[in-house]
Image (cartoon, rainbow, N blue to C red):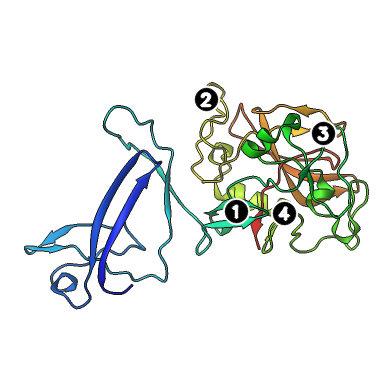
Amino acid sequence: LPNGIYLANISIDEKYKVVKKIMLLYGSQHLNTSVVTEPNINSQPISLSKTSSSVTIDSLVVTGSSINKIEYINLPSYTGVSLNLGSFSVNTSCPGIETVTYAGQTYHTVQIGSQCWLRENLNVGTMIPGKQDQANNGVIEKYCYNDSTINCDKYGSLYQWAEAVQYQNGATNTASPNPAFTSNVQGICPTGWHIPSEAEFQRLISTVDSNGNALKAVGQGLVQYGGAGTNTSGFLALLAGGRLYDGTFFLLSYYTIYWSSTENWSYQAYDMVLYYNNSDFYFYYNDKLSGYSVRCCKD
C-alpha cells in the first residue's frame, strides 16, 4: 500500500460499526522497530493504537500479499445501546475469491481447512413442477420446494442427480457415466468449481471434527435435541428438505441432503445428510431421481 491516511470501516453483523483512522507512513519513527514491534495482520489482531516508550503507533505495516475480508459470525442479539460480543467465531472467505457471480446470482465463499466452498446452495436454472422429471434438453432445470420460487431464493434449488452432473459422460438417472468419473465434475457449478465427491465431503466432515452442527447455520435445528446449528465452520447449511423420486416435497426444516458426484449404482448416488435433531452427519446412497441440494467446491 502507498503512504497515506486510510479509514478502516468495521461493521459487525450490520449492528455494530466503528471507523478508525490508520496512517501509513513508511520511514517514520512510528515504524521504528527499535521502539516497538508493529502488529502483523497475518498472525494476530491489528492494534489500531499502541504505546511504548512514549511513542504512539498509529500506522500499519502490511507484510502479506493481500488483505482478506474477515467475517464475524454467531454474534449475540443486539439489545439496548451496547453489544456484548461475548465469544464468537471468525471465518474468512477463500483467498482472493470473496464472491462468485454466476447466472445472475452472487455466491460467497468460505475457506474450511484446505477446501474452498460456496457458502450458499446453488439456485440456478428454470423452475419446473416437482411432479416433472428434469431432462437432458440443454436447459438447466431446477425444483423449488413446494413449487415456490420464494423457497429457492431462501434455501437454494433442488436437483436430480443427472441434472446436477449435467449428464457428463452419458450419465443419466438410470445409467452410469461411461467412462466412470475419475476427476472433478463441474456439472451445474460455475467454471472452476465442481460437484464434490463423497471423499471431499468426508474431508469436510473431518475438518470440523465430525460435528454436523458446525456446518449448520445458526437457527437451523433444535437445541433441545442437540441439533442446533453453530456454524462455526462458516458453511451455513440450511435444512432445505428435499424431493422424493415421485415428485413429493418433504421435511423442509428437518434435514438437508447434498448430492455428491460419486455413484453407488447405475440408479443411485451418494449424498451427505444433516438432521435437525442431532449433531451427527450421515452418508447414504439414494435414488438419482430424488431432488436434493447442490453445494459447489473449488477445483
Residue 42 in the figure: left or right of residue 137: left
- Say the numbered circle drawn on residue 117: 1
Q: Nearer the viewer, mark 2 or mark 4?
A: 4
In the image, is residue 52 above or below residue 277?
below
Residue 98 in the figure: left or right of residue 21: right
- Residue 284 image position (x, y, % from top left): 76, 40
- Residue 106 image position (x, y, % from top left): 59, 51
Are there few (<14), some (14-19), or many (20+) residues within 10 Å of tag 4?
many
Q: Are marks 3 and 2 in contact (CB under 8 Å)?
A: no
Tell me which amino acid carries mark 3: Gly
Of pointers 4 and 1, the one earlier in the residue sequence: 1
Tell me which amino acid carries mark 4: Ile
| Cα distance between the residues tagged 1 and 3 | 28 Å
Q: Residue at x 50, y 63 (%)?
A: 95
- Residue 210 image position (x, y, % from top left): 58, 42
Residue corresponding to mark 2 = 223
Corner quadrant of residue 102: bottom right
Of pointers 2 and 4, the one earlier in the residue sequence: 4
Q: Residue at x 91, y 48 (%)?
A: 266
Of pointers 2 and 1, the one earlier in the residue sequence: 1
Corner quadrant of residue 114: bottom right
Residue corresponding to mark 3 = 130
What secondary structure is marked by label 3? loop
Q: Nearer the viewer, mark 2 or mark 1?
A: 1
Residue corresponding to mark 4 = 195
Residue 232 in the figure: left or right of residue 57: right
Closer to us: 154 or 274: 154
Are there few (<14), some (14-19), or many (20+) residues within 10 Å of tag 1?
many
